[in-house]
Structure formats: structure tokens, C-alpha cells
Amino acid sequence: MFELTFKNIDDLLRTTDCQTELDYVEQTSWIIFLKYLDDLDTDRHTAAKLTGGYYMPILDEKHRWKAWAVPKKANGEIDHINALTGDDLIDFVNRDLFPYLARFRQTADSPDTIEYKIGQIFSELRNKIGSGYTLREILERVDQLHFRSQAEKHEMSHLYEDKIKNMGNAGRNGGEYYTPRPLIRAIVQVVNPKIGDRIYDPAVGSAGFLCEAFEYLKESKALTTQDVETLQKRTFFGKEKKPLAYIIGTMNMILHGIEAPNIIHTNTLAENISDIQEKDRFDVILANPPFGGNERKEIQQNFPIKTGETAYLFMQHFIKSLKAGGRAGIVIKNTFLSNTDTASVSLRKLLLESCDLHTILDCPAKTFIGAGVKTVVLFFEKGKPTEKVWYYQLDPGRSLGKTNPLNAADLAEFIEFQGNFADSPKSWSVNVSEVDQRTYDLSVKNPNGGEEVALRTPQEILDEIATLDDESADILEQIRGLL
């Protein structure tokens, strides 16, 4: 039911001012979120009744789902006479509902409550559905969804992830928000977070790393009541600069079961890393920072190694933000390993001297759908210098793409071999003492299969041309739709 409802909603949104997958996810998100809140209120009310207690609903009566979205008769049928529609519905949503929800940011007891998160989300959002008749139809379709059982919540969270993936595949901007989930799961498994660890992603995007870490920890053992409270309130932390990514990341975590995500809407790089104190540090950092950016001079002043490359500034933030003994799994462009500019060399030197960079996973082309860059994953532990780096060259034996993405089976051998740093035709170790101390070049050079070829194959170039053609066609179609 969830999947069909999502498809029907997307079809309806195409008739409105929503023109892209980003719009579809954003507008679907706020509606589903309010239905989720209604089911949460119902569950809490039922639990309170069973224990003889009293429960105060999160939203007042006028703004609850049952009152304005889909009012019903005593027999459970939709009360079409009293249900707002047309201009009346749009007027209520824009002038009453959204301002009411945004005020929760000022009235909530503390930032670590779901009320505060409601206020944050609706301070950032605006309704883009201009037709009250279309919105009425969407509301009635969403009302058929339920978030009462764990199975329903699980199905919903996975389908929401699929929508985020579709948004990522739709274009370069959306692609910033989506890292392939099989890769994230492999990273989480290697880093192996524990209950009680503080886990951080300062470039949180759609919160895929935090959601997968939550799922991993939920399955790690039979959770006590204290464990559950620890996971809910004291484990996951994130920061995100972009408004839409912040909303989607917060929503994604809530749908996965974290009721009040500790995600802050802020520019991480605007913080001076010299101000980071021990209390600000984390046990685990999992991230895929944006790369290719060109940060302003005033942002670069917050870092000892000056560079305009966004990912390299984030790398300094990661190292500074880890506790001694803290572990990290970081996705970064593979040119980080070999660039010869002063900042790149200095950053590699800093990483090798302050952290144990024990593993480098070399990812194949097209690991990130629609992106022409190759990436590596760096695994390191802070507090002791690197003596030996273990490399693994991931080779699925096929070309990756939209219809043939990276999967869990592709990563199984890497996870198995990484456990004891095994040598194989695709894995080997390098002593740091053998690395050129002038350049600290860490390029992937497989001694079993020759050096990595920097140039792309003709087929890879043709594949990227085809991807860019598809993106251009999508953009032109969107422009025609606006004319």
C-alpha cells in the first residue's frame, strides 16, 4: 500500500507547482509527517489509558490530522461536508496550520523534544501545492497509511529511503543527499559503533549514516530500557547547511524511530575548529562530505590548513572532532590521496601523524549514480600515528549504473577481509615508512594488478555523456513545463 500511495501522490504533485523529485520528497514529507504525528498521539493516548495515566496530545484539537485533514463521521467514513477543500483548505494550511506548527520552536520545553523539531521543520517549509482540490485528494490517500506497528514503520522508512534515492538520482543537487545504502552499511559494520558511543555526521544530508547506525545498534543486542533511552537522546548528532536536506534528514530519522533527532540546521564549516573542546568531541564520525565546493576566504580562516575545497575543510573538522580513540569512516574523492598542492599534502600528513589510517576502500566508478568522480572510503582511529595502511580495491566485476547499482554482495569480501587485513589479489598493505615523506602520496597502487589508471575508460566516458544527456533532457522538460 505504501508504494502505490507514494506513486499516486507523485502523479498528483506533477499537476501542481512541484516539478522535480526534490519537490515531490519535500511536499510528501510534511504531509506524511503530520499523519505520523497523529498515529503517534493515538499510540501514546492508548498507552496512557492502559496505565491509568493522562496524555496531552502534541497538537491542539483544531490542528490535529483528524480535525482538518480527514475529518470523519462516527461510522469512520470521511465527512466530506466538513472537510476543507479548494481555496479554504489552502488558506487554512498556509495561514493557520504552518504558522501554528512553526511556533513550536519558541514554545517547546527544550530542543531535544519532538515539539521543538516540529517547530524547526515547519519554520523551514512552505506548502507548494496550490490547488486545494489536489491537496484534498493527497490527504485522503495519505490517511490510508498507518504507522502503528513496527512492521508498518519499517516499511515506511524503507520506502522513504527509496524516495530519497530517486531524488538523488534525479540530478546533481539531489545526489548530494544520497549515499548508496549498501556502502553505508559496510562502513558502519567496519567502524562497529557501540551503544553508549556518541555518533556524529557534520554533513548529515538525508541522515543515511545515522539511520543505518541506529538500525545496526538496534540489532546489536537485546536492548534494555536504558539502552533505548540512550539511543533516542544521547547517541546521534548531525549538522546540515541546506534547508531541504535538513528537513529530509530530520524526517528520515523520525520515520526510522528517533523521535527528536539531534540535527542542527547550521553551516558546520562556519565554526572555528580551534573552539572545539573535549566536551564537543565524538566517539564515532560517519560522513560523506560534499566535495568540489569553493569555500570563501572567511570560511577558510576557521581552519589551520587553508583550502577552498569543501571536503578538505570537513576532514580537518572530523579529525578535530574525534575523541582520542574515536573511529571514523569517511567517503572522499580519490584525488585526496595524490593531489600535490600544499593543502592536500599537509592534510595527508596531519591525518597520518594524528590518526591510524588503517584502511582505504577504493570504490569503483559509478558507485555514486550520476557522479563522474571516483571515491575512496577512509577508515581511521584518532590518537596514534599510522604505521600501515591496508587497501582494498572493490571490483564488482561489472559496470555500475542506475539499473545495476552497488549491492551488499559486492561488499561482502571487503568486510570479511578487512577483519584481519588479509592480502588477496584485490587487497594489500603499505608501510607508512615506505611512503614518500615529501608528498605523503597514498595513491591506490595495486601490486597484484598494476597501478591504478587515472584516465577513465572510453565506456566510462560514454556512460557519463549519456548521464549528462539524460540530466539535460530532464532540465529541458522541466523548463517546458514552466512555460
Image (cartoon, rainbow, N blue to C red):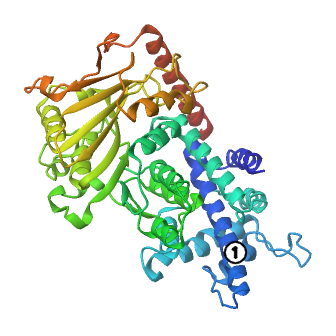
State the residue at coordinates (11%, 32%). Answer: 342
Q: Position of residue 226 (x, y in %)?
A: 49, 72
Q: Is residue 411 left or right of residue 358?
A: right
**Residue type at the position of mark 1:** Asp
State the residue at coordinates (70%, 91%). Answer: 52
Q: Residue furthest left?
A: 438
Q: Mark 1 — residue? A: 43
Report the quarter where the C terminus lies: top right
User: SS for tag 1?
Assistant: helix
The picture quadrant where one finds residue 424 is top left
Q: Is residue 201 left or right of residue 183?
A: left
Q: Position of residue 380 (x, y in %)?
A: 28, 42
Q: Position of residue 273 (x, y in %)?
A: 18, 56
State the residue at coordinates (50%, 17%). Answer: 463
Residue 208 vs 64, above or below: the answer is above
Residue 177 vs 282, above or below: the answer is above
Q: Residues within 10 Å of mark 1 (few under 14, many from 20)?
A: some
Q: Is residue 89 left or right of residue 436?
A: right
Residue 293 vs 252, above or below: the answer is above
State the residue at coordinates (40%, 36%). Answer: 419
Q: Is residue 336 visible?
A: no
Q: Is residue 428 left or right of residue 345?
A: right
